[in-house]
Amino acid sequence: MDPLILSFAVVNGVLLGGIYGGVALGLSLIFGVLRVVNFAHGSFLMLSLYIAFWCWSLLGLDPYLSVFVTVPAMFGLGYFVQSVIISPLIRRERALVVEPLSALLLTAGVFLVLDNLALMAFGPNVRAVQVDYYLPSPMLGPIPLNPQRLIGALAAVLVALGLSWWLRHSHMGRAIRATAQNRDAAALSGINVPFVYAVTFGIGCAVLGLFGSLIAPFMPISPSIGVAFGIKSFIVVVLGGLGSIPGCIVGGMVIGVFEAVASQHITATSAAIGSLGLFILILLVRPQGIMGRA
Amino acid sequence: MNTRTITATPRSAAGLPLGALAAGLGFGCVALVPLLVDDPFLIHSLIMVLFFAYMASSWNFLCGYVGQLSLGHAMFSGVGGYVSVLMFTQLGLSPWIGMLFGGLLAAGLSVLIGYPTFRLKGPYFTLTTIAFAEIVRIWVENTNDFIGVPLKGAEGLVVPAAGDSLWAFQFSSKTPYFYIILAMLALVMLATRLMERSKLGYCLKAVRGDRDAAEALGINPTPSTLAALAISAFMTALGGSFYAQFFRYINPERNMGLELSIDMAVMTIIGGQGTVAGPLLGALILTPISEMARSHLGGGLPGLHLVVYGLVLMACVLYFPKGAIAPLGRLAKRLTDRRGSRP
Amino acid sequence: MTTTILDVQGISKRFGGVQAVKDLSFSVGKGEILGLLGPNGAGKTTAFNMIAGYLRPDTGKVLFEGKDIAGKRPWDVCKAGIARTFQLSKPFGDLNVIENLMVGGFCRTGDRARIRERAEWMADFLGMGRQREAEANNLTAFDRRKLELGRALCTEPRLLLMDEVVAGATPSEAGEMVELVRRIRDMGISVLIVEHVMKVIMSLSDRVVVLDYGELIADGEPQRVVAEPRVLKAYFGERYVQSRA
């Protein structure tokens, strides 16, 4: 195979994979702290894509500027979902962690409601944002980089770094990590656990708000896009290790490169089956993922 | 929960357990419906309720008793449907025989998948079942021809009309389908009842409660769970064959998609997992909602019934974690207690 | 002590760099109550789990009635005739008392009526006859502990392994538990108890073995063992022994 085409595929895979990783960050963070598998993860991304779309279509707001709408809106929605829907469950459970299946069912309910409300409100049609300016493509040697994907991938790395730094050094970040380690001990040390949970959920969703705006310029938008990204995020997070932030970005890039290179050789169908197969294999053989702790 | 209490089973004067009597009466009454009313729409709706009750019961046979959430059961339904339809169109075999082959294939497949998968816990197990089912669905959806067998991809298969024939599992009236699915439901509920009281049932419930403790009591979790899984997959596949014969059409989206798996799981959970009547109750609550949203509101609001599912599911997880059957069971117990039938 | 029912011969277990149990040998006589003692972290629970089939010993043999059961899985160990309880009791929360007990019974037979009869008898034996229909989730901690004991007995063992019988129990509950264990022994079942509360084990055991840092440091009658300098050192430290000397 032509090395140029291969390296083009790899570079593109890294960029797209970075975005996958960025999208999956929230899922990993929420699982790491709350031990809740958020089945509605993709639905939140779908919503923020729609917000970005309507901001552009109705208000004429550039998708990149709609970040100022999507991020606070998704933070608010995440905060709301956690404090109103999930926290009664956590309060009911006497055990240290929520029974993972009940939480999964609850978020599956949120997924059903959000996805189908979107279907009812917006219909199954595919929409797309069209910006009327042209971003120059930077070159990496002989390979042109897609500017919009480059922005997304860079944002993913920056958000991951920023989030890790913040979790490590800020007061709130320490409270979040303490709560993740042991909820009851954190509560005994004066940490407002319900608040920490709600903020964590909010941050997880705010990250999705950001990526909704960043990928809106090149992503066709439909109600079912949430499921597609949701499944991909699960694969990425399991690959990188549930709860690991750097693992998320690495896992995303592995999947991105795998898909990009595989699509050169085999059909998209086989590639999709391949990544699901990889997902199963990782869960069976190394459930803590590449970067996760055993 | 009290509903699962097996002590001091209240007995009627004839010596039959009251529960069995009530179940017999209930099924008898339902069986009379086609004789009394002649409304194809009503019969159709009842068939759908019974079908989903059957599917949910098959799901419950495994998942309700071992406490694992499978969202991959639609795969077994698809296998059953495709095998019986293909055996009919390609080999001219009666669907009655084809569905048994489909069931056996699904059971075999389930054991192959279940053996490595059952070590996983909670959400990991659930995600893996989704992944397996999606692999099969995506493969069928994109395969037109597999070693000479025309799968016809996403387009799906049509069962050629063969007139009113018991042999071909095709009837011009809906009533025979009604009795078939009613009998199937009665069988799966009876099987669940027998399993619940047998050694297998106690093993599964023990594994659900605490795996280590179950092992300490002489239970090897693997054969028990695999046996229940194989039976559950077999029954789900029979349901898939029924569905294909009833609509004389089958496609990957409807017959092996994630939505069908969610239907089976959600109905059971809302009705009451790990109980004989829970899945039936769940189907009674949810199927009319989806049928109404589909027929009365036309195609105008395509996602409405799923929004309602989602809301009911959330309410159930939060307020009735044991399903709608729990408060009913308490009521029934209070009534039987008042009759003074307890020793 | 007439005949031996359990003979542990030189079992060892290493976790990474930690030698949890080192070349441990001891035996349990038929009809005997043997206490396995040692300070926290001495390797008691590791030894216990190797006998019960939850851990595979790196070396050594575990002979039960003359047959080596080392490395067998927990369910096979149970079927061989050894039952166990857990340090933190693990009842099947959404089953009631009778159903919990019946799970144990299915280990020996499929005869539901017989199992049920035995479960009813066991509930009375445990003093839980009035709670037979209570869900295990709604029982007190001590009742759950008793339930777990009863469930183990329903598997009709010849040797019962108990991990920490009285941890967290009130004095009167501890007394009740001691009485239960004695009655179990009187039924002809040998008992091996892991415990770090000295007082209980002294009054209950016929004989004790003491572990420290994974090694056997004493084996004998409770009163004699408790006076041994090595045992005192393990429990109270070097200084205590010197000051008494």
Image (cartoon, coloured by chain):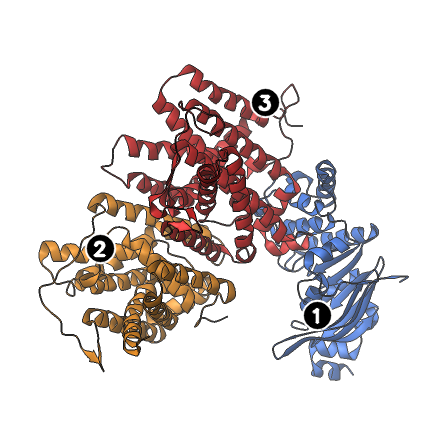
Report the amino acid beneath label 1.
Pro
Q: Colour of chain A?
A: orange
Q: Position of residue C34 (x, y in %)?
A: 79, 63
Q: Colour of chain C?
A: blue
Q: Using the image, name the chain to which the residue with label 1 belongs.
A: C
Label 2 vs label 3: CA separation? 62 Å
Report the amino acid beneath label 2.
Ile
Answer with left or right where residue B172 lies relative to residue A221: right
Which numbered disc covers residue C57?
A: 1
Which numbered disc covers residue A221?
A: 2
> Is residue B317 shown above or below B115?
above
State the residue position of label 3. Answer: B339
The answer to the question of whether label 2 and label 1 lie on touching residues, with beta carbons closer than 8 A, is no
Looking at the rendered structure, the secondary structure element under dot 1 is loop
- Of circles 3 and 1, which is in front? 1
Q: Position of residue A136 (x, y in %)?
A: 13, 74
Q: Colour of chain B?
A: red
